[in-house]
Image: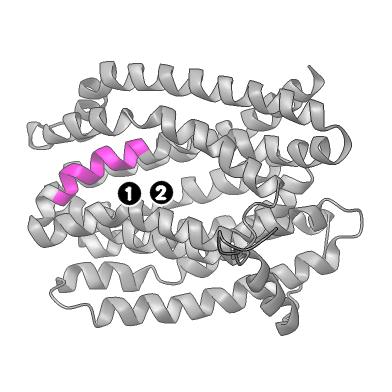
Amino acid sequence: MDILKKILHQTSWQMGAKIISSLCTIIILALVARNYGTAGTGVYTLAIAYLSFFYLAVDFGLNAHVLPDLIKENFGLSFQKLLGLRIFWAFILMILASSIILFWPGVENEFKQAVLIAIPAILGAGVFACAFAVFQGKLKFELSTIATSLGALIGLGLTYFVIFLSLGAPDLMLAHAFGIILGAVASLFLIQVFTKIIPVFDFTYIKKIIAESWPVSTTLLLNILYFRADAFILTYLKSFAEVGIYNVAYQIFQSLLVIPAYIMNSFYPIMLKDFAEDRSKFIANLVKACLIMFGVAFLGMLLTLLFAPLVIDIITGGKTFAGSIKALQMLSLSFPAFFVTSVLMWTMIVLKKYEHRISQPASCPR
């Protein structure tokens, strides 16, 4: 019961941050949809979808791998090396993201401009991911809530300012980038009570961590490719207006999918402790987590099917986004699978089943 209370307490902090950031995202989406139409919304949301791949790439799934070191008492050097790794990796990804978009054939200049404006946000995402690992290891999600909320509110304010000045759709990405960067700066300020924030660039450490964690990292990268390939396929087959219609639904869907992630952020440190100390307790809590996840997902699916027309109408305020309703309803059918597999994925990480092994041929004797 104490474990459940602890999970609920820490998850509630994360949910508080998500409520604030989701409200900001929805208000931004509403402002963009109402002021830039379907085509402008398509450019803006597709630029965010493109950069989201690099936000996840800079995360690289490292937090799950290094968290056992960060929950130790003397974790300062481990954090500093992780920060150095992420900064180094972020600059590589910034160059890669810029190069790809500059030489991507058949892409409109407005979309290229939108992406290039926000490239520095990749570094901000990497820095925040480092700080978040400390918040998670110390179960201090109230601090990450402050940083996340601050970044979201700043992003909203700057977006309104860009619209007030009647600037173009690509300029909206400047507000998006500043929100992420300032949220990262706030997170570094808040973790100073736990550790120094001076990065250490240890290339032996970088090589070792990448060699050990690449299976998880590859899984996450393939996951985001699978998740967001549809938007880019639409870009080639349809117009930016139709991409905008689809991405309005997807933005809402994506906001809801953080619920299982936040629950597991709180549960993962407890899973590590249970697995090390009491395997029967580990299994019992794992079963409970799966059942809770399925129940929450099923309820979320029903509510989305019922209220999708109302939500889309409130956000967009026009019939030009009517196609977003059906898209959101269809996307919601996948909630149970996403919620339950979130538990199973973290279980595999606890069990270290992500490690690469060369399997023996079936005919070999054992």
Can I make out residue 271 in this image? Answer: yes
Label 2 to label 1: alpha-carbon separation: 5 Å
Q: Quadrant where the N terminus lies?
A: top right
How crowded pointer 2 is (Cα within 10 Å; few <14, some 14-19, many 20+) is rated as some
**Who's the residue at 80% across and 38% down the image?**
275
- Name which residue type carries label 1: Tyr
Q: What is the span of residues highlighted in magenta in the rendered image?
A: 243-253
Compared across the picture, whether 134 is left or right of 300 comes to right
* Left or right of 218 on screen, residue 62: right
Left or right: where 205 falls relative to 48: right
Q: Is residue 63 left or right of residue 257?
A: right
Residue in view at x 47 percent, y 51 percent: 154
Residue 251 part of the magenta-drawn span: yes
Q: State which quadrant residue 208 falls in.
A: bottom right
- Tag 2: residue type? Gly
Instruction: Residue under label 2, please give it.
Output: 157
In the rendered image, residue 347 lying in the magenta stretch gets the answer no
SS for tag 2? helix
Helix, strand or loop at label 1? It is helix
The location of residue 236, given as percent across then percent down, is 12, 62
Circles 2, 1 touching at the beta carbon (< 8 Å): yes
Instruction: Identify the residue under disc 1.
Output: 160
Give 167 or 117, whichever is nearer the viewer.
117
Query: What is the x, y in percent for residue 246?
Result: 19, 43
